[in-house]
Amino acid sequence: MKNLGIFLFIFSLIYLFFMVPQIGSDVQTFVILDKDFNTDNAKLYPYLIGIIIFLISILMIIKGLIIKEKPQVSNSSRIYLHKAKDVGILIVISLIYIILLEPLGFFIMTPVCLAVFSWFFGLRKWSGFILEPILITIIVYVGFELLMKVQLPKGILERIFY
């Protein structure tokens, strides 16, 4: 915990003092539910994220100093091989998602990919397998398309509905 905290602490300092200042400043107007919101600085959210990472890293360092973790030693290399296989499968699923996202679209690929991930991680209930991927897709759509005005890939639905 302490080592990860130190890494995040250093990363947050680099992020806050070297990366975020490179972002250009401009005034943007966002329309959310027929109301105009002006942001005077495009650096606001990156700075907030950097500060949150900074604070979490400090808490992780303090927790690592207070609570001494005992290293866990595993004698079986089969566990690592099994985990490596799982990571490989997840990477393949993610690559398939990325490749098919543009032609099939966000509304088709995202619930399918989330359902596959849910099944892979052992969720077999219909709520975790069907309902949650659809709800997550709707939440992401509202956040990106409606609130932030970021276009998501429409895919084949663009030819049908637009």
Image (tube, rainbow, N blue to C red):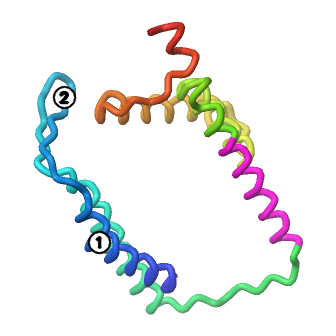
* Mark 2 crowd level (few <14, some 14–19, many ≥20, 10 Å Cα): some
Q: Amino acid at mark 2?
A: Val
Instruction: Pinpoint residue 54: horizontal percent, then vertical percent.
Output: 32, 74
- Picture quadrant of residue 131: top right
Q: Are marks 2 and 1 in contact (CB under 8 Å)?
A: no
Within the magenta stretch, is there residue 16? no
Q: Position of residue 43 (x, y in %)?
A: 22, 56
Count neighbours of disc 1 (C-alpha within 10 A) and say few if under 14, some if 14 to 19, many if 20 or more. Answer: few
| SS at circle 1 | helix
Name the spot of residue 27 as percent of width and height, x first. 12, 43
**Looking at the image, residue 96 lies above or below residue 57:** above
Q: Nearer the viewer, residue 4 or 91?
A: 91
For label 2, the SS is: strand
Q: Which residue is mark 1?
A: 18
Quadrant hosting residue 9:
bottom left
Foreground of the two, 142 or 26: 26
The answer to which of marks 2 and 1 sits earlier in the sequence is 1
Q: Is residue 160 left or right of residue 112?
A: left
Any mark on residue 31, and which?
Answer: 2
Q: Residue at x 43, y 79 (%)?
A: 60
State which mark lies toward you, 2 or 1.
1
Q: Nearer the viewer, residue 72 or 155?
A: 155
The part of the chain drawn in magenta is 78-95
